[in-house]
Image (tube, rainbow, N blue to C red):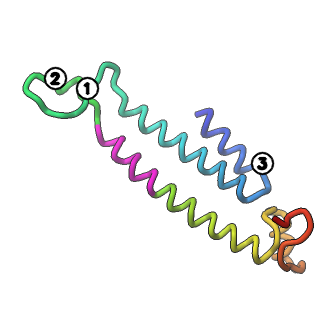
């Protein structure tokens, strides 16, 4: 829960889009940890049926499989978001959300300049 709140704070409080993406990734990771913890069983064994294995002690493999899929999706979404951030930076010359809104409302925009230049 703490990790999710840290990510949420980063998304809400920061103006830089890359920092907001980092906050979203922190939130995703906290959700992954939560689901993995749901599948944890103290003293559990791998869910492989053998002759002497007690089914009540077997760990549920579904959360682990879902998290692996979620990680792949999260990495893909992050890559897409970063490519869009690059396009925004090339178009407006800044990653500050307030400046982007100001430019959208009628300000001028150009390439990177000043403190935002790489």
In the picture of the structure, the residue carrying the numbered disc 2 is 54
Magenta-colored stretch includes residue 54: no
Q: Quadrant of residue 60?
A: top left
Give the class, few, some or many, for how many residues have Cα within 10 Å of label 1's Cα (few <14, many ≥20). Answer: some
In the picture of the structure, the residue carrying the numbered disc 3 is 13
Give the main secondary structure of the magenta stretch: helix
Q: Are marks 1 and 2 in contact (CB under 8 Å)?
A: yes
Decide which of 85, 101 is in the foreground and name it.
85
The Cα atoms of the two marked residues, 3 and 1, are separated by 43 Å
Asked if residue 16 is positioned above or below residue 45 in the image, the reply reads below
Instruction: List x then y, in percent, for residue 61.
Output: 29, 39
In front of the other: label 2 or label 3?
A: 2
The Cα atoms of the two marked residues, 1 and 2, are separated by 9 Å
How many numbered marks, from 0 up?
A: 3
Asked if residue 96 is positioned above or below residue 63 in the image, the reply reads below
Asked if residue 35 is positioned above or below residue 77 in the image, the reply reads above
Secondary structure beneath label 2: loop
Residue range corresponding to the magenta coloring:
61-72
What residue is rendered at 84% in x and 63% in y? Answer: 98
Is 74 left, or right, of 95 in this rendering? left
Q: Are marks 3 and 1 in contact (CB under 8 Å)?
A: no
Instruction: List x then y, in percent, for residue 87.
Output: 69, 74
What residue is rendered at 85% in x and 75% in y? Answer: 103
């Amino acid at each position: 829960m703490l990790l999710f709140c840290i990510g949420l704070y980063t998304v809400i409080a920061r103006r830089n889009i890359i920092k907001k993406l980092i906050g979203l990734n922190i939130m995703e990771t906290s959700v992954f940890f939560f689901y993995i913890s749901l599948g944890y069983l103290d003293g559990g064994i791998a869910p492989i049926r053998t002759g002497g294995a007690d089914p009540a002690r077997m760990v549920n493999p579904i959360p682990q499989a879902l998290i692996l899929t979620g990680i792949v999706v999260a990495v893909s979404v992050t890559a897409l978001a970063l490519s869009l951030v690059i396009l925004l930076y090339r178009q407006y010359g800044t990653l500050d959300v307030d400046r982007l809104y100001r430019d959208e409302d009628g300000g001028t925009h150009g390439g990177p300049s000043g403190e935002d230049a790489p």
